[in-house]
Amino acid sequence: MDRILYAGGELLTGSEIAQAIVDYAAALAGRRSAASIDIPIRTTSGGVARAHLLIGPASQLVTEPVESEFDELVDEDLVTRLRTSAAALASTRPVVGATDGDDEIDDADTDELEWPPIR
């Protein structure tokens, strides 16, 4: 499990989820963009709830591993969507026949992403 320190509070979630959030936040920051995400969290009583986060260039996220008596939270679909979104924000491809000396173009523009917000 990982603790996410965010906006003056803390959330407990799965380690893979926390790492994917940080990677996605970094990719968004590189594009000066933001997104809202919905993640599973462990409550103080051990239950599972959802948290809604706004992440972007101004996000200051810190994650740290913690030991917990509760089972690790796992959401493979969420982690895959976060990693896919981060990769799309970072990817570039060559442009055939570019004449202005710029031989790369952004492959994804956050304003034109076709999938809904990550939930």
Image (tube, rainbow, N blue to C red):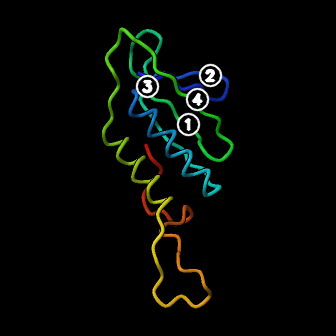
State left or right for residue 1 relative to residue 100.
left
Which residue sits at x=66%, y=29%? Answer: 7
Q: Nearer the viewer, residue 49 or 110?
A: 110
Dot 3: element: strand
Question: Few, some or many C-alpha atoms within 10 Å of disc 4 (few <14, some 14-19, many ≥20)?
Answer: few
Q: Earlier in the sequence, mark 4 or mark 1?
A: 1
Quadrant the C terminus occupies = top left
Figure check: 109 above or below 13: below
Question: Few, some or many C-alpha atoms within 10 Å of disc 1 (few <14, some 14-19, many ≥20)?
Answer: some
Question: Few, some or many C-alpha atoms within 10 Å of disc 3 (few <14, some 14-19, many ≥20)?
Answer: many
Identify the residue under disc 2. 9
Give the amino acid at mark 4: Val
Identify the residue under disc 1. 53
Q: Earlier in the sequence, mark 1 or mark 3?
A: 3
Q: Point out residue 2 in the picture as x, y percentages from the top left corner.
A: 45, 23
Q: Nearer the viewer, residue 35 or 25?
A: 25
Give the amino acid at mark 3: Thr
Q: Residue 13: which numbered mark, if any?
A: 3
Figure check: 65 above or below 37: above
Quadrant the N terminus occupies = top left
Q: Earlier in the sequence, mark 1 or mark 2?
A: 2
Dot 1: element: strand
State left or right for residue 40 relative to residue 27.
left
Q: Point out residue 28 in the picture as x, y percentages from the top left corner.
A: 57, 51
Give the amino acid at mark 2: Gly
Give the amino acid at mark 1: Leu
Q: Earlier in the sequence, mark 3 or mark 4?
A: 3
Question: Few, some or many C-alpha atoms within 10 Å of disc 2 (few <14, some 14-19, many ≥20)?
Answer: few
Identify the residue under disc 4. 62
Q: Earlier in the sequence, mark 4 or mark 2?
A: 2
